[in-house]
Every structure is written in structure tokens, then in C-alpha cells.
Image (spheres, rainbow, N blue to C red):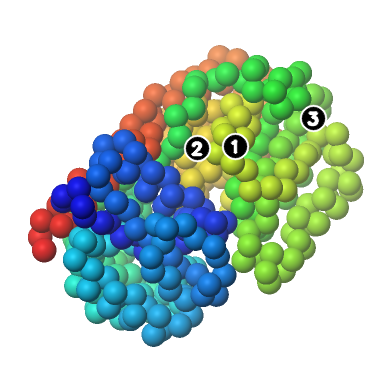
Amino acid sequence: MKKTDWIHFLSSYPPRECGIATFTKDLVNSIEENKNPGIECKIAAMNENLGAYSYGRDVNIQIDQDDQESYLIAAEKLNKSKRSKVVCIQHEFGLFGGEFGEYLIPFLEELEKPVVTTFHSILPGNPDIERQRKYVVKKICQNSDKVVSISGYGKDILMHKYGIPKDKIAVVPHGVPQIPFREEAKAKKELGLQDKKVLSTFGLMDRRKGIHYAIRAMPRIIEENPNAMYMVIGETHPVVRKHHGEQYRNYLKGLVNKLGLKDHVKFENRFLSLEELCKYIQATDVYMTPYYDPGQISSGTLAYAVGSGTACVATPFLYAKDVLRHGRGMLVKFKSSRCMADSVNKVLASRKLRLKLERNAYNYTRGWHWPAIGNTYMDLFNTAASRQ
């Protein structure tokens, strides 16, 4: 690829508040700023309502996720662009219209550019809906030059459940920012959390995150660690807020009051800047991920925590099983506040155990920094472009 070439990302994108949007922005930055200053990244932005966001100049195509014609118009624009050499699709089932995002299929069939597709969700599934989901996933893979999974378990599912050839799948870890190893004393002081044992969970909030199980674990944690403080960081997911308002957050606040935890649970109801988020991660003694979807194969929040060398306690969803094995974290039963509490207490009670978890996690993720991930994606893009 030449310096005048474009890589087009089909994805949600800031200012839309969405984990995939954040991922895409970080990936774009890593490509443009670190190794490929002449390559330009452009965005075909996925919208719930066309025109709902005020984008920057890098967004030159917009698609209404529920308007099938919008996808075909975008494909036509991309086909006519001489500078656009590769299209990278950041795939999440909820981003695209139709059953299991089937509106993406006509777009791909119309598109004449090489395609690299990253799957942020790869669902093993319910037999009642298996046929349609398999159809959509297989069609996406058939029309992609390369597909990317963020974990090894995701690759296994694509191969064995969807029949995708092994050589078509690349495993590329979730990128993480460069956070210095364990400067918690300084971060705690800046956040006013000195003398606290800081527990945290961050990200856009919805019920599937299982935060209520972590809150219910707090009384048992406080018995052994009376200075424990659980930070619940992040606003309610915009889609959840649109359909259900702040119902879940209000439920959590009610639970905190019921359990008498006002001095031990704090909510930061904001979409934090990267700088703020990194500071909270550095201040965290134990990161809790109480999700209860066993098939989840990616978690940017857990990736950030592991990448910073934070001791992590998580339920055994697929991504957590992948990144926390071999002594890089602790796994607990789904929907068990008691197990969550016991494991957190175990980590807080043993400096030796905590340091082991921190070091193992930090050493394992040294290749996950965004510059390295950007370089890996550029290799995939160059390979795909060479086939045109």
C-alpha cells in the first residue's frame, strides 16, 4: 500500500459511545501515528439514526443500520473510490440491521474491495436460532479475505462450529494503552482513595455485566477488608438507556442502600477519557469482571486491566478463561457473590499471590500495546490489498 492509500473502517465511531467505536478509534490512531504516517484511515460509520452524530473529517460515509439501501449506497461509494484499498469491518451483531446483522451480507456481496473482518462476538449458540446465525457468519467469512478473532477460543469456534478454514483466521489480541506497572499509591492519592483497598469494574453498564453480584459480594469482602471501596465506573450503555432508562443503575443504587454499602460502593456515571480511565486502573487493587454470558469471547475492559498488570477476578466466560489462565488471574463461579468475595479476599490477604497475578498478567500482555496491534493489522491489510 502507498502513502496516498486509504483504509476504510466500517464500524461505530466516536462521538458515538460504544466499545467498538473506542476500539476502532484506538486502532486508527495506532496505524496513523506509529508506523504508517502516510496511510490515511477513513470511516464508514454505522449509525442507529443517520445524522445523529457530529463526526470529524475522517468519517466520509455514514450508514443507517436499519436501512438496507444505505448499505448498498455505501458499497457503491467504496467501489468508486480509487484511494480506498481495503475495508476493515469491526463486527458486533448489534451494530448491523436485520436478523443477526444480515443487512451486512448484500453490502459485502456488492463490495469489490478486499475485506478484513474482526469479530468482537462469536456466539456458540442456541439451537433454535443456530441456522440463521450460522448462515450470516459464514456469509461474512466467505466474503472476507481474512477474519480476525480477539482470542484463541474465538478461532476454535469459527473453525469447529462454523467451518471456517484455519488459514483464513488470524488471532490478534485486543489492544491496550501503555500503562506503567503498578503505580497505585500515586493514583490513589490523586483520586482521593488513599488508605483504601480499591476494587473496580468499568465500561458501559448493562445487566449482563453482573455488577449486582459484585455488589452483593461486598459485605463479605468488608468483613475482612473494612477499608474496601468498589468503584463502578462508566455510564449506562446508550442502547440500554434508550429502551430502559436508568432502571439497572437505580436498581444497583437501591441494592447498595439495602446492604448498607454507601461508604463502600461509589458510582462514576461518566464516559471517562483514556487518561482518567488509566488512572482508575492504576489505583485498582483487584479488578472484578462478574459477567454472566459464558460465550463472551472479547472484553476490552478486562484486556485493559490485564494489560496494566492488575490482579483480576472474573467469572469463567470464554475470554476470561483464555487470558487469565496459567496464573494470570482468578476465575470464580457464575452468579456467585460468595465465590467472588472469597477470591477477592484471598488476593487482598496475600501480597505474594497478588504480585504473582500482577506480574504474570503484565508479562503476558507486553505485545498487546496499540502500536504493535496496529502493525499486525497493517500486515493483514497489505496482504489483503496485494490480492486485488
The residue indicated by pointer 3 is 222
The residue indicated by pointer 1 is 277
Q: Residue at x 66, y 36 (%)?
A: 200
In the picture, the quarter occupied by the C terminus is bottom left
Comes first in the chain, label 3 or label 2: 3
Under circle 1, the secondary element is: helix
Under circle 3, the secondary element is: helix
Of badges 3 and 2, nearer the viewer stands 2
- Circle 1 packing at 10 Å, graded few (<14), some (14-19), many (20+), is some
Determine which of the numbered discs, if any, sits on residue 358 in the image. none
Comes first in the chain, label 2 or label 1: 1
Above or below, 267 relative to 226 = below
Q: CA distance from mark 3 to mark 2?
A: 26 Å
Residue 195 drawn at (x, y percent) = 76, 18
Which residue occupies the extreme left position in the image?
A: 387
In this rendering, would 367 be left or right of 179?
left
The answer to whether the residues at label 2 and label 1 have Cβ atoms under 8 Å apart is yes
Residue 125 drawn at (x, y percent) = 44, 67
For the residue marked with disc 1, what is the amino acid?
A: Leu
The residue indicated by pointer 2 is 304
